Image (cartoon, rainbow, N blue to C red):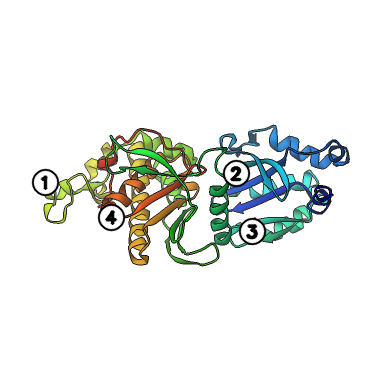
């Protein structure tokens, strides 16, 4: 009886949307415990939406379902199902709304849960084009609750959260799982188009300490200008093949070696893009070098601010999240290194499996660390 009531009063499909400045992130719950009776009663529109979302990994030219992130056989509100993660550029939001109209989504739902700045920006378009109301939720509330939830359910049998043991020693650094069972207090660094840094004392008690406008959107925007790339993936691929020391001025370029009085090794970055004042240097660099230097500049800035906030708030656990870290091995390694090195092992950088998939290669890390 409870299950039957759930079916009628909590209508499928279940969606959640985070409409960011660069990307839209869509979470879809696919029930796998549908009874024969429920399937018979299911309307054709709902069947069509389910087939469309679960039988494709790409939607149009830019929509992607990250199959590797799927969470299987979760129990939510008494139902068992799979969580699917779909993303597409925010600039394609109107096309998504029109798809909702074409699939007659309003016949199944009158409202959608949404968060992020786009929940306000596109609210009128949802209403006028697709006849849908947005149930708007605060994005930072959602961020904290979502973080705690995904850590509590794990990643299909393995821990969601991890850190690097010995991050300042690339040859001996090892990825280790950990739990956020007792996570508070923590510094939560949310890296999207821009960056927000939160001091979190409980799931309901937190404050936004500060932020920076230099985030993932800055990295992609500058790379588009400097290299002509057209996507985040292309920019990261270029960065992986570049050498930032051709672009950045290092301590050794100024002192001829280490700055021993303050413990600064000659390989530390002293001035991001500092070599670009030289016409000869500008003519010799590659687009890959520029992409790498841009990525390190943004990452170093975020790491530096996060460390200062952690010290000021007296918090030793720093959790980095956000789509900037997706497939971004370079930044993940650099943030782990920076937190450990500059705090002399007092600060621990934590990451989520759903944000990044780091590989074993730590090549070039010592040449790219924070000044």
**First along the sequence among labels 4 and 3:** 3
Seen in the image, is 23 located left or right of residue 102?
left
The answer to whether the residues at label 4 and label 1 have Cβ atoms under 8 Å apart is: no
Q: Secondary structure at mark 1?
A: loop
Above or below, 205 relative to 293: below
Count of labels shown?
A: 4
The residue tagged 4 is: 343
Q: In the rendered view, does 90 fall on the left or right side of 259?
A: right
85 vs 110: above or below: above
Mark 3 or mark 2: which comes first in sequence?
A: 2
Rendered image: mark on residue 119 = 3
**Label 3–label 2 contact, CB within 8 A:** no
Q: Are marks 4 and 3 in contact (CB under 8 Å)?
A: no
Mark 3 to mark 1 CA distance (whole Å): 52 Å
Mark 2 or 4: in front is 4
Distance between the Cα atoms at labels 2 and 4? 37 Å
Residue 1, percent across and down?
A: 84, 49
Label 2: few (<14), some or many (≥20) within 10 Å? many
Residue 287 visible here: no
Between 12 and 256, the one lying in front of the other is 12
C-alpha separation, residue under disc 1 versus residue under disc 2: 47 Å
Residue 287 lies, in percent from the top left, at 36, 38
- The residue identified by callout 1 is 256
Label 2 sits on a secondary structure element that is strand
Q: Which sits earlier in the primary sequence, circle 3 or circle 1?
A: 3
Left or right: 173 as drawn, with respect to 275: right
Q: Which residue is mark 2?
A: 88
Of labels 4 and 3, the one closer to you: 4
Q: Dot 4: what SS?
A: loop
């Amino acid at each position: 009886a409870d299950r039957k009531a759930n079916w009628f009063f909590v209508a499928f499909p279940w969606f959640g949307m985070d409409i960011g400045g660069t990307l839209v992130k869509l979470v879809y719950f696919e029930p796998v415990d549908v009874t024969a009776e429920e399937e018979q009663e299911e309307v054709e529109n709902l069947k069509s939406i389910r087939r469309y979302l679960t039988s494709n990994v790409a939607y149009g030219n830019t929509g992607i379902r990250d199959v590797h992130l799927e969470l299987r056989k979760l129990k939510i509100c008494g139902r068992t199902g799979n969580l699917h993660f779909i993303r597409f550029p925010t600039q394609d939001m109107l096309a998504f709304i029109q798809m909702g109209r074409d699939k007659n989504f309003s016949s199944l739902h009158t409202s959608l849960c949404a968060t992020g700045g786009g929940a306000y920006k596109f609210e009128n378009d949802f209403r006028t084009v697709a006849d849908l109301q947005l149930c708007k939720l605060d994005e930072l509330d959602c961020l904290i609750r979502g973080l705690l939830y995904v850590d509590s359910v794990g990643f299909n049998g393995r821990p969601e959260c991890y850190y690097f043991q010995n991050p300042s020693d690339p040859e001996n650094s090892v990825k280790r799982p950990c739990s956020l069972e007792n996570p508070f207090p923590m510094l939560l660094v949310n890296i999207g188009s821009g960056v927000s840094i939160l001091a979190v004392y409980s799931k309901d008690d937190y404050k936004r300490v500060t932020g920076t406008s230099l985030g993932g959107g800055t990295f992609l925007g500058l790379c588009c200008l400097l290299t002509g790339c057209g996507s985040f993936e292309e920019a990261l691929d270029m960065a992986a093949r570049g050498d930032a020391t051709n672009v950045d001025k290092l301590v050794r370029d100024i002192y001829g070696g280490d700055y021993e009085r303050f413990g600064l090794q000659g390989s530390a970055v002293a001035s991001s893009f500092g070599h670009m004042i030289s016409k000869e240097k500008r003519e010799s660099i590659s687009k890959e070098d520029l992409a790498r230097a841009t990525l390190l500049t943004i990452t170093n800035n975020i790491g530096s601010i996060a460390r200062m906030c952690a010290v000021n708030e007296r918090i030793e656990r720093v959790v980095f999240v956000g789509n900037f870290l997706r497939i971004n091995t370079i930044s993940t390694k650099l943030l782990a290194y920076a937190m450990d090195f500059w705090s002399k092992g007092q600060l621990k950088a934590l990451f989520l499996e759903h944000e990044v998939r780091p590989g074993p290669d730590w090549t070039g890390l010592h040449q790219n660390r924070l000044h």
